Image: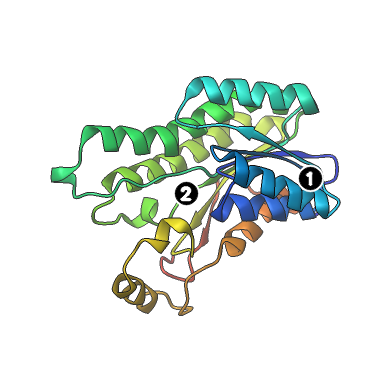
Amino acid sequence: MNLEGRVALVTGASQGIGHACALALSREGATIVAAARNQQKLDELVGVISGAGGRATAIIMDVAEEDQIKSGIKSAVAQFGKIDILVNNAGITRDQLLMRMKRADWDAVLNTNLTSAFLCIQQVIGSMLKQRWGRIINVASVFGQMGQSGQANYAASKAGLIGLTMAMAREVASRNITCNAVAPGFIDTSMTAVLTDEFKQSAVKNIPLGRVGSPEDVAHAVRFMASEEASYITGHVLNVNGGLLMG
């Protein structure tokens, strides 16, 4: 899966799945543009990649802010000349039963998880169209496929991301640009760390493989979708959920 000469932008790269994706793509030779809000964590990531002989840069970007998306990606393109691979990974949760959910929590999750992906795609698609090659990979969720009580905003954002993936795949396929989604299940990240042990144990019982996933499990799928080996796959949702949802 040689990605030498490719430039990959990963949002939410400071931790969890995004961090693992950045490292996985870097190991295959891609230059990494790591985007997130935490400067210290981004600098640490860049240091790890550089220390291993890779090439990376950090850009501070709150994907809930359109101006930051535009300026951040503009600076990355100015530095490297292009973005070949976009991994829309940044995401948040604001869980609450629908009848109690505040409009602000709905808007925050939709803006961060869905609208940001739309905006990031708009900013990188020009260079992809020009060179007639690109990989857009959206990190969705099993809960965008099956729903989850208390996560109407999160589930809606991830379901929307799947719809966006399929629409975009149709729009740009003729230019040799693929757009796919990876849908993680229960993954061991800071987002799931706040859940109770009782909930985690109950969740594992519903996973045929009998364990929670790791960020690396998701990163391996993203790395594949970014490669030439996946050149005939587009508009697809690759489930990485241990069998939690099948079909």
The reply to whether discs 1 and 2 touch (Cβ–Cβ < 8 Å) is: no
Query: Which residue has dot 2 on it?
Result: 140
- 112 sits left or right of 195 in the view: right
Of the 4 image quadrants, the one containing the N terminus is: bottom right
Q: Farthest residue toward the left?
A: 99
| Residue 228 in view in this figure | no
Residue drawn at (58%, 59%) of the image: 218
- Which image quadrant for residue 215? bottom right
State the image coordinates of residue 107 (x, y, percent, origin top left). Answer: 31, 32
Amino acid on which the number 2 mark rests in the picture:
Ala
Amino acid on which the number 1 mark rests in the picture:
Ala
- 192 sits left or right of 167 in the view: left
Q: In the depicted view, which residue is nearer to us: 11 or 205?
A: 11
Name the secondary structure under disc 1. loop
Name the secondary structure under disc 2. loop
- How packed mark 1 is, by other alpha carbons closer than 10 Å (few <14, some 14-19, many 20 or more), is many
| Residue 6 in view in this figure | yes
Residue drawn at (41%, 61%) of the image: 192
Q: In the depicted view, which residue is nearer to us: 235 or 187?
A: 187
Circle on res. 30: 1
State the image coordinates of residue 136 (x, y, percent, origin top left). Answer: 62, 39
Of the 4 image quadrants, the one containing the C terminus is: bottom left
- Which image quadrant for residue 23? bottom right
State the image coordinates of residue 81 (x, y, percent, origin top left). Answer: 79, 25
Which of marks 2 and 1 precedes in the sequence? 1
State the image coordinates of residue 27 (x, y, percent, origin top left). Answer: 78, 55
